[in-house]
């Protein structure tokens, strides 16, 4: 067994690893207001368990790993985990963060082996940012972004969830911000997942219309970004800025899906928009061998569904985005 290929002939080469379901922000599309039903830390996979699972995944052909959450930087000693995963020889080890703690951790993360960063930023207006994030301070994220630049991260991708009537009047401002600072910018459609799903439906913005709007002001040229994931990319002519459009609703990309998600509690999810999963933690804590673990992962990938069903069953997925692992 040296490759993971599902029944639809898609090669699974990318694992997103959540190290915690907790976060120091409360973004409206991710965690409902007042939510406190987080997993207890003893239910999270230990660093030893995460390293062991990833070692098996690497043996099965995975070469891209992204550390996520919740907010991964709230997990104590996460830099140590990065060092351990980097030691597995993973060619592409990246991390997604809200940026709040990045000013302090950017250089240690870079030194430990993180090669790329994705940073969430849904508004450049301090009051609006605070409202979207449940009290977050924009200055902390901006300081983190500057620290990441100084530490040598490149590219730094800014991820913005497009929300109708919330931040859709800021897209041009965000473009100019990314041009000035040399960031890549990616717009993401809201997804109807968990108890925040109804709000996401109300705020949903079809990014096809946004692309047409931006094309009236900017000369946008299609480009291919190696390892760019599900986004469709356009370059703003005359600049280095590349804009990615991630469209799970208006133009889904299921036919090219190459990823699975490992939640903090050890659940391996085969699709963000379906409930297909397998419990790897139980296997680990029952002293299963690496061979048994590999066989279970291969069998799980065989269950990966062809596509999500956000259109047909918009409230089908009731788990929170923070619990799934981004």
Image: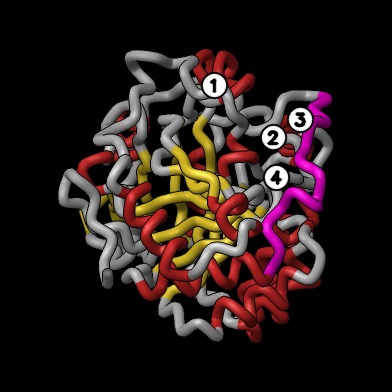
Identity of the residue drawn at 47% across and 66% down: 65
Mark 1 crowd level (few <14, some 14–19, many ≥20, 10 Å Cα): many
Q: CB of mark 3 within 8 Å of CB of mark 4? A: no
Earlier along the polypeptide chain: callout 2 or callout 1?
2
What is the CA distance from the residue labelled 4 to the residue labelled 1? 20 Å
Q: CB of mark 2 within 8 Å of CB of mark 1? A: no
Q: Which residue is mark 4?
A: 21
Magenta stretch secondary structure, dominant: loop
Which structural element holds mark 2? loop
Q: Which residue is mark 2?
A: 27
Earlier along the polypeptide chain: callout 3 or callout 1?
3
Earlier along the polypeptide chain: callout 4 or callout 1?
4
What is the CA distance from the residue labelled 4 to the residue labelled 2? 13 Å
Q: CB of mark 4 within 8 Å of CB of mark 2? A: no
* Residues drawn in magenta: 34-47
Question: Which quadrant is home to the N terminus?
Answer: bottom left
* Residue 302 seen by the camera: yes
Q: Determine whether 237 is above or below 81 in the image.
A: above
Mark 4 crowd level (few <14, some 14–19, many ≥20, 10 Å Cα): many
Question: Which quadrant is home to the C terminus?
Answer: top right
What is the CA distance from the residue labelled 3 to the residue labelled 2? 8 Å
Which structural element holds mark 3? helix
Q: Nearer the viewer, residue 242 or 41?
A: 41
Q: Nearer the viewer, mark 3 or mark 2?
A: 2
Q: Nearer the viewer, residue 292 or 57?
A: 292
Identity of the residue drawn at 44% across and 59% down: 15
Q: Determine whether 85 is above or below 198 in the image.
A: below
Identity of the residue drawn at 73% across and 69% down: 78
């Amino acid at each position: 067994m040296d490759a993971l290929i599902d029944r639809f002939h898609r090669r699974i080469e990318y694992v997103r690893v959540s190290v915690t379901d907790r976060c120091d922000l409360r973004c409206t599309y991710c965690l409902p207001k007042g939510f406190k039903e987080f997993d207890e830390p003893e239910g999270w996979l230990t660093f030893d368990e995460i390293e062991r699972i990833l070692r098996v995944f690497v043996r099965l052909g995975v070469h891209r790993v992204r550390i996520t959450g919740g907010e991964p930087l709230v997990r104590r000693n996460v830099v140590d985990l990065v060092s351990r995963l980097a030691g597995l020889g993973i060619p592409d080890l990246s991390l997604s963060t809200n940026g709040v703690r990045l000013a302090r951790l950017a250089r240690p993360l870079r030194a430990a082996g993180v090669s790329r960063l994705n940073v969430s930023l849904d508004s450049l207006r301090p009051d609006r940012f605070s409202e979207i994030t449940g009290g977050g301070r924009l200055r902390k994220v901006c300081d983190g972004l500057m620290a990441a630049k100084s530490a040598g991260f490149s590219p730094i991708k800014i991820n913005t969830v497009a929300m109708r009537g919330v931040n859709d009047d800021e897209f041009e401002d965000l473009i100019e911000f990314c041009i000035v600072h040399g960031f890549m910018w990616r717009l993401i459609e809201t997804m109807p997942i968990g108890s925040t799903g109804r709000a996401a439906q109300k705020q949903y913005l079809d990014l096809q219309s946004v692309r047409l709007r931006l094309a009236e002001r900017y000369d946008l040229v299609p480009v291919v970004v190696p390892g760019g994931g599900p986004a469709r990319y356009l370059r703003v002519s005359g600049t280095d800025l590349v804009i990615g459009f991630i469209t799970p609703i208006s133009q889904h990309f299921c036919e090219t899906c190459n990823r699975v998600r490992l939640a903090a509690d050890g659940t391996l999810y085969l699709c963000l928009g379906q409930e297909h999963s397998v419990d790897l933690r139980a296997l680990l804590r029952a002293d299963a061998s690496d061979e048994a673990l590999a066989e279970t992962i291969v069998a799980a990938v065989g269950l990966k569904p062809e596509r999500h069903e956000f259109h047909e069953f918009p409230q089908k997925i009731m788990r929170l985005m923070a619990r799934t692992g981004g």
